[in-house]
Amino acid sequence: MLSLVGARSIRWFRTVLPVRYSVVTGGQTYDTQPTEEALGRHVNSGPPKVGSSFVCRTHVGSFRGYCTAHTKLSCWKCQQTLEDQPTFFCPLCKVVQPADESASHFQILNSPHSFTLDTQKLQKTYLQLQRTLHPDNFSQNTKEEQQHSEDQSALLNKAYRTLLKPLSRGLYMLELEGMALEEGSDSGADPSFLLELMELNEAVEDAQTPEEADRIGRDTKVKLEELTDQIDGALNRGEHEAAKALLIRMKYFATVEEKVKEQLSKLM
């Protein structure tokens, strides 16, 4: 048995099933299969620091998911145990807490981990949090609180920008699956598709009236809506490679959409 001892320790042990582990943290047990690298790192480095986290891979058929297990956190000022993660304010002394860099953007915005989101609800949550966490609210507080509010606000902005649009949201979801889209990774796109995109870009540049540019924009919007539905289905089925290919297409059409907007501004 491998054990990390301490009030906030994470204990790893083998279950009856081979090459699977249970992670006990914060009173909850996660049945997972940590990577050898993660397992070795945490065992050899001693008890994890407060606020640290690790990634554990789980394999169910062809599906590969990730979970983040947190050590138990306490308020930096009064030492009150923080049950919720991420926590923005201490429930006891009410001071703003350090930003939790290990929390996902979905957790930060209290949003379902899903490609299809209610963006109006997302915006409402974002605005409510931003109003309470904005650095201007802490200009008369301690330097620690000022810094924490700046960090929280910056992380909140990043989470919102990422989840607001389907393209960035989908790419982020792939990143959580260990499938970040590298620069140049879309070079293997279908030649016929690239030809279609080249002709579409030329049509945008050649548009002589707002009506012509707007027509291309409407067609592009339909393409993006179709891709959104297809990507959602692929992610729900755990078909991450298919979702990646579709997101590459969405990336191209999103670029066309931006060019249409630029052309319209010139023609107006």
Image: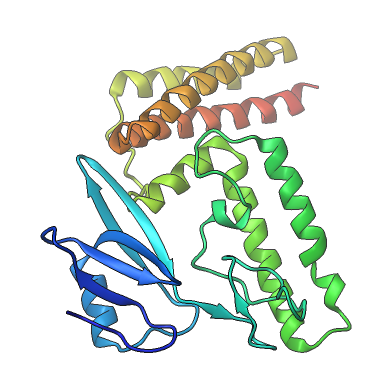
Q: Is residue 34 visible?
A: no
User: Which image quarter holds the C terminus?
Assistant: top right
Residue drawn at point x = 86 percent, y = 79 percent = 139
Count of labels in the image: 0
Residue drawn at point x = 31 percent, y = 89 percent = 46
Provide residue 7's location: percent of width, then percent of height. 43, 87
Residue drawn at point x = 38 percent, y = 58 percent = 67
Name the foreground residue: 47 vs 115: 47
Provide residue 28's location: percent of width, then percent of height. 41, 65
- Left/right placement of residue 184 relative to residue 16 reads right
**Above or below, 161 relative to 19:** above
**Above or below, 216 relative to 64:** above
Provide residue 89's location: percent of width, then percent of height. 71, 72
Name the foreground residue: 99 vs 255: 99
User: Which image quarter holds the N terminus?
Assistant: bottom left
**Above or below, 155 relative to 242:** below
Q: How is the image coloured?
A: rainbow
Name the foreground residue: 60 vs 14: 14
Q: Quadrant of residue 246?
A: top left
Q: Quadrant of residue 255?
A: top right
Name the foreground residue: 264 vs 125: 125
